[in-house]
Each structure stands twice: as structure tokens, then as C-alpha cells.
Image (spheres, rainbow, N blue to C red):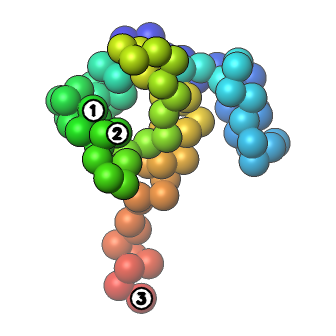
Amino acid sequence: MTELLTAASRKSLTADASPDLLHSGWYSTDEVADLLGVDSSTLRRWRTGSPPQGPPFVRLTSRVTMYSVPDVQAWLASRRIDPAQAAA
């Protein structure tokens, strides 16, 4: 799998709360599934649930859905639990 997070997108994440979606890199459903260690059907189920779950996505066509690198990173960060802080 190709690493899509470039130095420019890392810089835009730290310098700005709203990343440049055109140049920050994109993952396919299969790539996000591989990164998360889940089946791609899980991501499809999350997207089509009511309410939708999982990382934010962009539906380009009825068959093509993409995930921006910063959105996936932000979604993962939002679900992160630090045991030291949770115990306090």
C-alpha cells in the first residue's frame, strides 16, 4: 500500500484546522479497510447505516467512495482512548 500522507499534508494538518482536501491524499475503501484491519464490507455497512458511522467519506460515484487522509486520521484520533486519562 502506498503511503499517501505527504510532507505538505502533514504541514497543513498542523498549521490549519481545515486540510486542503485536494492535495492531502486519498484512500480507497480497500485501503482504509487494510489500515483499520477490517473487511471492506464493514466500511460499506458503516457508510450505509442510519446514522452513517466510520470516518468521513466522499462518494464520487455510486461505485467509488474515497476517504481523505486527514479525515481518517482525525476520526481515529477522536476514537482514541488513553487508559491513563480514562482512569483519572
**Residue linked to disc 2:** 47
The residue pinned by badge 1 equals 44
Mark 3 / mark 1, whichever is N-terminal: 1
At 59% from the left and 20% from the top, the residue drawn is 25
Residue 9 visible to the viewer? yes
Q: Nearer the viewer, mark 3 or mark 1?
A: 1
State if disc 3 and disc 2 touch (CB < 8 Å). Answer: no
- Three-letter code, disc 1: Arg
Give the class, few, some or many, for how many residues have Cα within 10 Å of label 1's Cα (few <14, many ≥20).
Answer: some
Q: Which mark is residue 88?
A: 3
Q: Residue at x 42, y 88 (%)?
A: 88
Q: Is residue 73 visible?
A: no
Viewer-proximal residue, 11 or 18? 18
Q: Is residue 3 above or below residue 58?
A: above
Q: CA distance from mark 2 to mark 3?
A: 34 Å
Q: Residue furthest top?
A: 2
The amino acid sitting under disc 3 is Ala
Q: Measured along the vertical axis of the image, is residue 31 above or below residue 19?
A: above
For badge 2, the amino acid type reads Arg
Residue 32 position in % (x across, y down):
36, 28
Disc 3/disc 1 C-alpha distance (Å): 36 Å
User: Quadrant where the N terminus lies?
Assistant: top left
When asked about the image quadrant of residue 4, the answer is top right
